[in-house]
Amino acid sequence: MLTKNQIKLITSLDQKKFRNQHQLFVVEGKKGIAEFLNSTFELYHLFATEPTFKVNDEKFTLITESELKKISKLKTPNTALALFKIPNTKPVDESKLILALDDVRDPGNLGTIIRLCDWFGIKDLVCSNATVDCYNSKVVQATMGSLTRVNVSYLDLEVFLKAHKNDVFGAFMEGKNVYEQMLPDKGVIVLGNEANGISATIETFVNTRISIPRFGNLQATESLNVATATAILLSEFKRGSTEK
């Protein structure tokens, strides 16, 4: 049975300040929960309408569908919701290709970008402190479990780039055609805010401005969605990579 305190805790985790305070986040759905249970993430508690998962009894509560609806953020609730502990930040491996986000605000975009990092083998995603929280429930849902395999770090992007030793590539509307460049196996690729792109401060640390050329006859499309641009750029960087 679901208690009032449990409902209060779970609903409070909609807000970043309470996620930080409790060091917990929400995962919904059997597939997503299974991914986290099979990872290094530590389960805090699991609520489900059926005893599908093998977890310690003290960390499991059997609930009804109506109780699940009270705590779920999905339009059509799945059969389970779990709370996991937010892990300690891991160091960034600067010897590999790194993706950096400068103030990306949309949860769906960040979730998709985390999935893309997983797909293309990008182990480290570094985010400015203004970028949407990766433990936001919408982001977690959009990652489809990829959050378990990508190290997401929130830091002062200016300080990080200033100390970074390898090349820093920035995605701009006006830049060198990415399809015509010799692209390295290591360095940082920076993508910016959905509306404003890369900030002027972060731009000063970019060594190479790259762009994805438009091929439409009218050249009327203003810009690509940041997640779509990420997919194209990572594909191009990895296409000629020596790391397979």
Image (tube, rainbow, N blue to C red):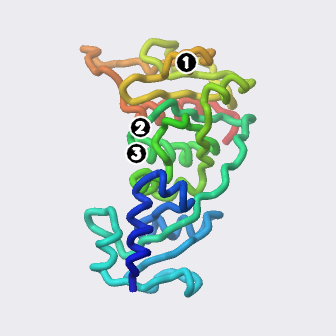
Gap between marks 2 and 3 measured at Cα: 6 Å
C-alpha span from label 3 to label 1: 24 Å
Q: Position of residue 52 (x, y in %)?
A: 46, 82
Q: Is residue 147 visible?
A: yes
Query: What residue appears at the point 55 percent right and 18 percent down from the top-left corner?
Result: 201
Question: Mark 1 — residue?
Answer: 201
What secondary structure is marked by label 3?
Answer: helix
The quarter of the picture where residue 57 lies is bottom right
Secondary structure at numbered mark 1:
helix
Describe the element under mark 2 as helix, strand or loop: loop
Which quadrant of the figure contains the C terminus? top right
The CA distance from mark 2 to mark 1 is 18 Å
- Residue 137: name its quadrant: bottom left
Q: Position of residue 205 (x, y in %)?
A: 62, 18
- The residue at which mark 2 appears reads as 105
Of 25 and 117, nearer the camera is 25
Q: Residue at x 70, y 36 (%)?
A: 96
Amino acid type, mark 3: Pro
Q: Position of residue 123 (x, y in %)?
A: 64, 45
Q: Nearer the viewer, residue 79 or 183?
A: 79
